[in-house]
Structure formats: structure tokens, C-alpha cells
Amino acid sequence: MIRPLLLSSVALCLSLTAASAKVPQVATDIPVVQSLAAMVMQSLGSPMVLMDAGADAHDYQLRPSQAAALEDADLLIWIGPEMTPWLERAAAARPAGATLGLLADPATHRRSYATEDPAEADHAADDHADHDHQGTDPHAWLDPTNAAAWLGLIADSLAAQDPEHAATYRANADAARERLARLDAETAARLAVARQKPLILGHDAYGYLAEHYGLTVAGTIATGDATSPGAARLSALHDLVARSGAVCFLPDVGQPANIIQVLTDGASIRVGRPLDPEGRAEAPGPGLYPELLSKIAASITDCVTAP
């Protein structure tokens, strides 16, 4: 009796090992995408994020160890070249089924950047150096309906590579979508007080958020994610603050204090807590995306309701 039991135990161990070996190794481009993938994978695996903490998603270079890890990954999940152009060549070289581009998928609601910048309306000839935002806005996760759709896309891609755990991936995605639906409703209720109150924000990344929750973005310091505003743009923004009746200015995390001071000097506008739309400062994991959206909503609400 001992020998059959021993053989049965060995077979069970081999079966479990084989099952765990089928779980894909997943690489993601930015913390937000890593968070969504982690929601779907849960205890089955831990997706890695290629971008270092605090780095600029638009202007980054992979370290050799990261490039090697990407080659070993079974699945790359990324926003697309509009967000992380440094991954475009590596993504194109991967085999079919080994890459999931979220922004390009038909399930994604896409919007374009604003065609006219309010801060430049009266300064058209002054300073064009900052005008590098054209085409599709890649910050689509700031509309939580996109994040919910992406959970399904991620589950489907993982299930295609790992059919044995397909039901688990899809169940995790369903649970995460329910969580995001509650978060969306809570965020909408929280941000209701901010509607009709013009905001000045750090850079042109909040179009999806504003569109989804009915917010008014009067202007942004930088039109590009990696650009620094010139003197003419700062002057135009300073004028816009008074002209638009903007009540709050919310810079991005890491935005230089001297720029904030120049913009708000002598202006009747409150300065709120810095925003982190890409989750650069957050700990990676399934809780990052909900935490990011909650913090953005809290910062905006606290600023517009401050005495």
C-alpha cells in the first residue's frame, strides 16, 4: 500500500508543478498596467513592471537586466507606443500572441488631445516649443470604464496562454470589475462638487478624467508630458488664471516649485496636493489603480472645497 500511495503523491506533485509552470511570465510597461494585470493574476503570479519607480513613462531606457527579463516574458502588456515609445521596437519583434496593446484594442474608448490650448489662445505666435501633444491621448486608464475593459482583455490574453487557469483569470477580472464599478460610483459622487469649477493642472494628461466626470480643465502647465513650459507659456497661463476664474491649481508630482510660484504669484487661486496620474510614487500591486484614482479625486475635491 505504501508504494501506490507514494506514486500517487509523486504524481500529484508533478501535476501541481506542471500547472504552476504554465502560468505565464508577464511584463508590463507602467505601474497602472501592472496593477490591472495583478488584479487578474492574483495569487497565480506577479507581473513585473519594466519602468523604474519615479521614472518618466515617455522618456525611458531599459536597463540590460530589464531587456533580458522582457525577452523571457511570455506576455507583454502595455499601453502602446503613444505612451511608452521606448518599447515599440521590442513589442514589434515579439511573436504573435505574446503582446497585448491596450490602447489600440477596439474595446478602448479613445480620445484625442484638445486641438486648441486655452492658454495659447491669445499668444499664438509666442511660444510653440511646448506643442508636442497631438493625436490620440494615451492616458486612457483615467476613464475607469477603460480600465474595466482592459481587465477582460488581460484575462483573455492570459487564458489563451494558460487555458488551465482560464476560469480563474476571468473570475478575478469579474471581481475586479465589480470593485472598479463601486470605485467609479464613489469617485463620481466625490467629484460632483468640483464640476463647473475650472482647474489648472500639471500637464495634458487628464482629458479622460475630465470627460468621464464632467470636470473643466482651464489649462495645463505643460502641453507635453516631458516638456518644460517657456516664459511665454507661463505668462499666458498666468493671464488665463484670472480670465477663466480657475479656482484650483493641482501640479504633478515632481513639478518644479519655481514654476508653481510663477504661475500663482499674485493670483487668487488655491494650490492643491500634487497629482500622480501614472502611479509613479505608488507601491506596485493590485491596489495601485484604485488608490491612484481615489487620491486624484480626493486632491481635487479637497482643493475646490477648501475655505
Image (cartoon, helix red, strand yellow):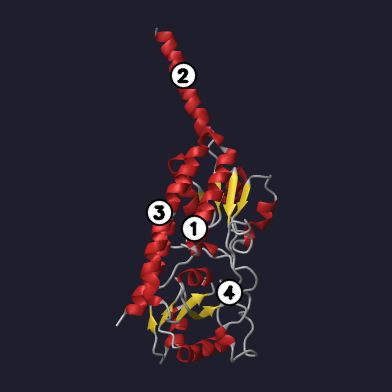
Residue 283 visible within the image: no
Of mark 2 and mark 4, the one earlier in the sequence is 2
Q: Distance between the residues labelled 1 and 2?
A: 40 Å
Question: Residue 200's spot in the image, x, y percent?
Answer: 47, 80
Question: Residue 67's spot in the image, x, y percent?
Answer: 61, 50
Question: The disc labelled 1 sits on which kind of residue?
Answer: Val
* Position above or below: 4 against 26: above
User: Mark 1 highlights which residue?
Assistant: 32
- Of circles 4 and 3, the one toward us is 3
Question: The disc labelled 4 sits on which kind of residue?
Answer: Gly
Q: In which quarter of the image is residue 182?
A: bottom left
Which residue is at the far top? 1
- Of circles 3 and 2, the one toward us is 3
Q: How far apart are marks 2 and 4 (CA)?
A: 58 Å
User: Mark 3 highlights which residue?
Assistant: 179
Of mark 3 and mark 2, the one earlier in the sequence is 2
Q: The residue tagged with tag 1: helix, strand or loop? A: helix
Q: The residue tagged with tag 4: helix, strand or loop? A: loop
Question: The disc labelled 2 sits on which kind of residue?
Answer: Val
Q: Residue 18 — which label?
A: none
Which residue is at the far left? 307
User: Mark 4 highlights which residue?
Assistant: 224
- Residue at figure coordinates x 58%, y 74% from the top left: 224
Question: The disc labelled 3 sits on which kind of residue?
Answer: Arg
Q: How far apart are marks 4 and 1 (CA)?
A: 19 Å
Q: Residue 10 — which label?
A: 2
Determine whether label 4 and label 1 are within 8 Å by CB. Answer: no
